[in-house]
Amino acid sequence: MSNDRHNAYKTHQHEQETPRETEARALLGCARRIEAACQPGASMDDYIHAIKHNQQLWTIFQVCLCEPDNQLPRDLKVLLLNLSRFVDKVSFRALVEYVPNELKGLVDINRNIAAGLGVKTATDTAIESSMATQSASVMTSA
């Protein structure tokens, strides 16, 4: 990875955070921002900035995936680059035409990739906690 991209990661990386955690946090932040921008009452500026911010993140991913020293398996790189093409396609359309319903796909992609990076969302944590509580009550009542 070139120095500029490495420095960009370092700038946004929290102390004690791995690059995977930084990427997941960025994806989840973009997902939240898009969702908020699609809510009734959100401004058109919020909508446009949320889309552009997400697209910038995916552009960074595209560049990093094409770096010669990127050690991800080729099949994974191809899959992620194809996803990034979809993100571009949806983003460009959404910037030209107000289509908040179509942005749910971008939110889902970001959340799924973040989950694959091993970072849990608040919803995931709540679901796991609920399941653990239910399991504990089943175990004690048996």
Image (tube, helix red, strand yellow):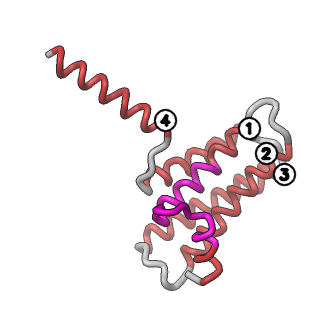
Label 2 close to label 4 by CB (< 8 Å): no
Q: Which residues are magenta?
A: 8-30
Please give the label number shown on residue 96: 3
Label 3 close to label 4 by CB (< 8 Å): no
**Residue at image location 74% in from the left, 33% down from the top:** 39
- Residue 43 belongs to magenta span: no
Q: Which quadrant of the figure contains the N terminus?
A: bottom right
Which residue is the site of mark 2? 47
Please report whichever mark, 1 or 3, sits nearer to the chain's N-terminal start: 1
**Nearest to the observer: residue 4 or residue 40:** 4
**Residue at image location 37% in from the left, 27% down from the top:** 130
Amino acid at pointer 1: Cys
Circle 1 Cα neighbour tier, 10 Å, few/some/many (<14 / 14–19 / ≥20):
many
Say what secondary structure mark 1 lies in. Answer: loop
Which residue is the site of mark 1? 38
Amino acid at pointer 3: Val
Which residue is the site of mark 4? 123
Distance from disc 2 to disc 3, alpha carbons, whole Å, reads 12 Å
Circle 2 Cα neighbour tier, 10 Å, few/some/many (<14 / 14–19 / ≥20):
many
Please state the horizontal and vertical placement of residue 7, each as a whole percent of the image: 62, 76
Please state the horizontal and vertical placement of residue 100, each as a whole percent of the image: 74, 39
**Nearest to the observer: residue 116 or residue 74:** 116
